[in-house]
Amino acid sequence: MRLETWCTAFFLVFTLSPSILAQSRDSCTAVMDVKVAGVEITKAAHVEAGTTETIPWNQTRTAPLPAYCRVEGMINRRTGVGGEEFGISFALAMPDKWNGDFLMQGGGGSNGIVLAPLGLNAAGDTPGLIRGFAVASTDTGHKSHHSGFDFAFMRDQQAYLDFAYLANADVATLAKQLIAQHYGKPAAFSYFSGCSTGGREGMILSQRYPAIFNGIISGDPAMRTGLSNLAIGRWIPIAFNQIAPKDANGKPILEQAITDNDRKLIRDALIKRCDAKDGLADGLISDPLGCDFDPEMLACKGEKNDSCLAPEKAAAIKKAMEGPKTSSGTQVYAGFLYDTGITNGPPFRGLLSPGPGIFGPATTDMSMDVDKEALAAIQPLVDSMSTNLTTYSAQGGKLILYHGDSDPWFSPLDTFGYYKDMAAANGGLDAVSKWSQFYFIPGMSHCGGGQALDDFDLLGAIVNWVEKGTAPTSVTATGRAFPGRSRPLCAYPKHAQYKGAGNSEEASSFECR
């Protein structure tokens, strides 16, 4: 999301007349008088055009915003376990120049923070608020005390339920009431867009609250966190512990299991094997399912040297990437794709750059009981695996899922597996493609970053699908990792393929095939 583009979008917003501006301010202030059981409106203030909000993941970039009404409040304030105050805090931004639609943005990590209601996810260069959406956000019912991964609130049952699935539905329902009051008419269409935890939230809403949203975008969803934690926090490091050098106490030094030379060797071989399958060697693997790379291809046939991997190391990498399996060989969590980002170092650490992970310190265990641990890792309240979306689809709902191919936290193959299962349960891929699509994002780490084209406008695509009946055929992606380059993102089962002629840096030289 580039600042100069946001600035352009801001200056295109029309100038309000003094009388309209006064009406907008009065209407905003009047929100304070709304009386809904269990709801406290703590703020309703008109915000002048040109103000900025800090972008949470990059403190140096801010966006000039149009004039809007900022409403803040809390639903169901209460005292819970340990005497801690709980309640579903929310923020709602209602622009003076409203496009008639409502957009709810998803959270991230453990939530616990009310992010600025901007509507950034999968919105390309122009956040939802600048487009004219009324945008809502929420902390889903608790406060994070020390980081974006503070799960201590789960000791309180109601707080856990709110986080798992209740809060977003409550906030969306209230936001629609406030929007109708403020503008004098209800929102014409309602959308949800989120990534990671927000991606899971989108899936939950399609599965458990099918009548709330007309369109949902779910990215890199944390759809089975217990089992994904089992994969990246247990299965993968344990596989690498078996090949890692040991410290003075005999404990494996995980960070040294795979060397820089190993990573370069793997990356070079992976690129050579799979990059050009889309018709062009450009550092992007556009057809991840067609990549037939196997690390055991690099195993030394004789004495170990820098041009090959020790056989036990190649075997450990293959085992790690295949994902956790039970003693009988049953897959309990999906394996991971062989993509360009698996060898990345910080800040977008890949799966073959092992070390302490976001979910806690690295284990020093040398084995695990997958059968037992997998059963304990299933979390029915937060897992978003229901495939029966007949109500959502029947009422015209559209669902777009996407996943970064180099995501080291949640496997893109797990999300893809859900999509295939969901399609099978709802009439098959041809039938489901009329209302749902899945996109692989080559090179992208978790929700963005990496050697990827990670800037794309799925929000505009789903609005056109819902409101005009125009299904996306492709979505153009750009990114700072490849200045001046664009590519089409293609919905499964297609991928971007070079036509064989034309500027290789332009999306128009590619087709979805």
Image (spheres, rainbow, N blue to C red):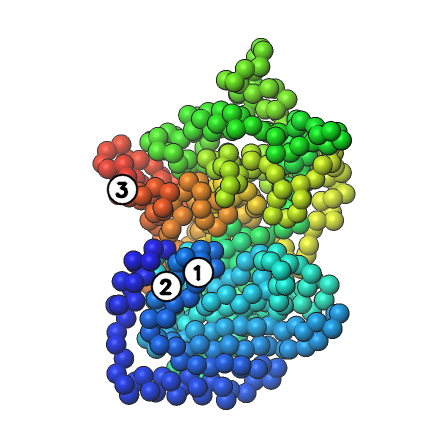
Callouts 3 and 2 close, C-beta under 8 Å: no
State the residue position of label 3: 506
User: In this rendering, is residue 14 above or below 282?
Assistant: below
Single out the mark in the foreground, 1 or 3: 1
Q: Residues within 10 Å of mark 3 (few under 14, many from 20)?
A: some
Q: CA distance from mark 1 to mark 3?
A: 29 Å
Name the image quarter holding residue 355: top right
Q: Position of residue 280 (x, y in %)?
A: 33, 31
Name the image quarter holding residue 98: bottom left
State the residue position of label 2: 63
Is 482 left or right of 433, judged from the image as shown?
left
State the residue position of label 1: 55
Q: Residue at x 44, y 42 (%)?
A: 450
The amino acid beneath tag 2 is Ala
Callouts 2 and 1 close, C-beta under 8 Å: yes
Q: Position of residue 256 (x, y in %)?
A: 61, 30
Question: Secondary structure beneath disc 1?
Answer: strand
